Amino acid sequence: MNSRENSTNDDRPCGTVTQIAFQKKRAQRRSVFIDGEYAFGVSEATFQQFHLQPGQVLSARQIEIIKSHEEFERAKELALKYLALRMRSDFELKSYLKRKGFPAVVVRRVLFYCHELRYLDDRKYAEMLVRDMCHINRYGRYKMVAQLRKRGISPEIIRQVLSELIDESEQKRIALKLATKKLASLQNDEKSREKLYRYLKQRGFSYSVISDAVNRLLKS
């Protein structure tokens, strides 16, 4: 059977909607019955989208489209709740929906929807993260890059955001402040220089920034 024959069969009447009833456990959803048997459940959005009503004759193709749209509605609802907690990257939302078991086609549709409403913006997300990592976490440039990559931010956006928001002199000031506090806890340790280097490296500062901070503190 060729694709045209398959399409013709899918468009043939498959059954008649005989009942639509609110679900007992989830009152915001409806159960759709075809030819007297339960066929599928739908949200209010899907119900309104397809104007479902008793007596409506549906083909197999129409039923598949309705089910696909319902899956999109479920994924969209989860996505909006996920984004309401805090900003996310495209990669984070995509990974979240995949973990929930949604197929790639539904995930792409949800991401498109979120972009259309400007709920997703990797550039703005990266800018927010960099500001927080610099002024709250007090990370060095390398650690910022690692954190941005972890969230799936593209190399081009990372490069642009860091070049615009991260200043070498500011990094040196932050590193010096962290090193000063760390040195006070070392109490004249013989390996103070080594430990300061290791500490600042773990926080993601570059070698030049670390050297500047350590040399200013330990001039001998």
Image (cartoon, rainbow, N blue to C red):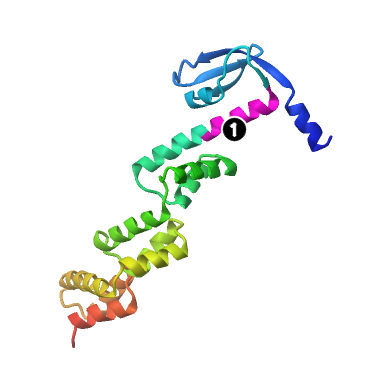
Instruction: Name the side, left or right, on which 59 lies relative to 168.
Output: right
Q: To which quarter of the image does residue 18 belong?
A: top right
The main secondary structure of the magenta stretch is: helix
Residue drawn 46% across the image and 50% down it: 90
57 displayed left or right of 20: right
Q: Secondary structure at mark 1?
A: helix
Quarter holding the N terminus is top right
Image spot of residue 198 (x, y percent): 31, 74
| Residue range corresponding to the magenta coloring | 59-72
Instruction: Point out residue 202 in the picture as x, y percentages from the top left corner.
Output: 33, 69
Q: Is residue 101 left or right of residue 86?
A: right
Q: Where is residue 41, by image quadrant?
A: top right
Relative to 20, is 1 above or below?
A: below
Q: Amino acid at mark 1?
A: Ser
Magenta span includes 214: no
Q: Residue furthest bottom?
A: 220
